[in-house]
Image (tube, rainbow, N blue to C red):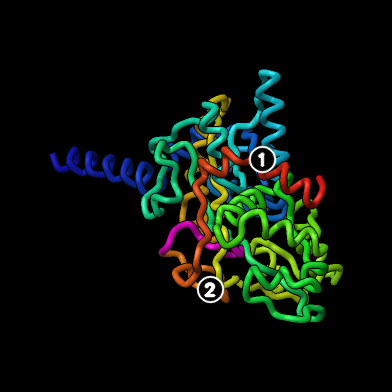
Amino acid sequence: MKRNKFGSALFLLTLFFFGLILPWGVFAQARGILHVYTSQPTNQMTEVIKLFNERYPDVKIELFRSGTTEVMNKLEAEFAAGSPKADVVLIADSIAATKLKNEGRLYAYKEAPIRGIPKEFIDPDMTFFGTKIITTGIMYNTKLAKKVPSSWQDLLEPDIARATIMPSPLYSGAAVIHVGSIVEQPQFGWKYYSILAERGASATQGNGNVVEAVSRGEKAYGIIIEYMAMNAKAKGSPVDFVIPREGVSVITQPVAILKTTKNLSAAKAFVDWQLSDEAQRQAVQQGYYPIIPTIDPPQGYPLLGTVKYLFADPAVLLRKDKENKKRFAELFGG
């Protein structure tokens, strides 16, 4: 009897250890090729894949990386051809994710591990999930700037406008959110961008181009997502970043699984990992605000509780997306 009890106890302990403490059963199911389409910078995704593969060594990620607009264009072309390749998308903004959801393209992952994540960063139907908090503010070259900006209105000064560069919503998902959010604010509207254009501000493709232009001194000011400016500063570029007093726009870089995925178990594993503490700590190391409030933000970043947000309804931004891009292109070129 004692031996049987001991054997039963050992068996249960083994099940607990392997089934709960180390979920090898879950890991074993995640294998094969996983196609990830993303707008996150390539060097960061290399780090993401490396750490992900420490947990899921049998999953090989095939990456397509570009700006959110180009990622969406590639997806739409694949949908039209009847041969979607992506399993997972990790893109800059909720507008693009909402568009995919409304078209019936996304898988509802009801069991996703969302505990501890604020509900405003999660799609109510569980089709996409924020993975980071990214704000857009003003970057400036500390050697060239004639004035340290403290307001979005400062960029309208003629000398500053001529020295200002920004990402285009025709390419950047973060810029889609930012432009859409700004024009929805009564104190700004399209008049704000019209004045910027009239006074010589310029647009480039993505946020990376803005960082390079300001860091190299081609421009003194840039409208930019904060982590790129802060990373450049940390690496020794003569730049700094400010949060304008009127507030900042926010993106959450949502992750989502496509309904047409050919590797659902690996896709779920990728989402699970993106929402884990481990991935969130890596995001902080890469310069992002974490989506989980209990994890500290990067050193030197303003506490999120002190930051004012310029919010706009994602449904409104989606409805006005084509119109906003058209008007922006008319002002700054395509």
In the depicted view, which residue is nearer to us: 298 or 52? 298
> Is residue 283 among what the camera can see?
no
Residue at the extreme top: 82
- Please tell me which of labels 2 and 1 falls first in the chain: 2
In the rendered structure, does residue 171 fall within the stretch colored magenta?
no
Q: Is residue 231 left or right of residue 102?
A: right
Please name the residue shown 73% across and 46% down the image. 171
Q: Quadrant of residue 43?
A: bottom right
Amino acid type at mark 2: Pro
Residue at mark 2 to residue at mark 1: CA–CA distance: 34 Å
Q: Residues within 10 Å of mark 1 (few under 14, many from 20)?
A: few
* Image quarter hosting the C terminus: top right
What residue is shown with label 2?
302
Disc 2 on helix, strand or loop?
A: loop
The image position of residue 262, as x and y in percent, is: 58, 25
Label 1 sits on residue? 323
Q: Which mark is residue 230?
A: none
Where is residue 287 drawn, in percent x and y? 61, 64
Q: Amino acid at mark 1?
A: Glu
Q: Which residues make up the magenta segment?
A: 283-293
Q: Nearer the viewer, residue 226 or 47?
A: 226
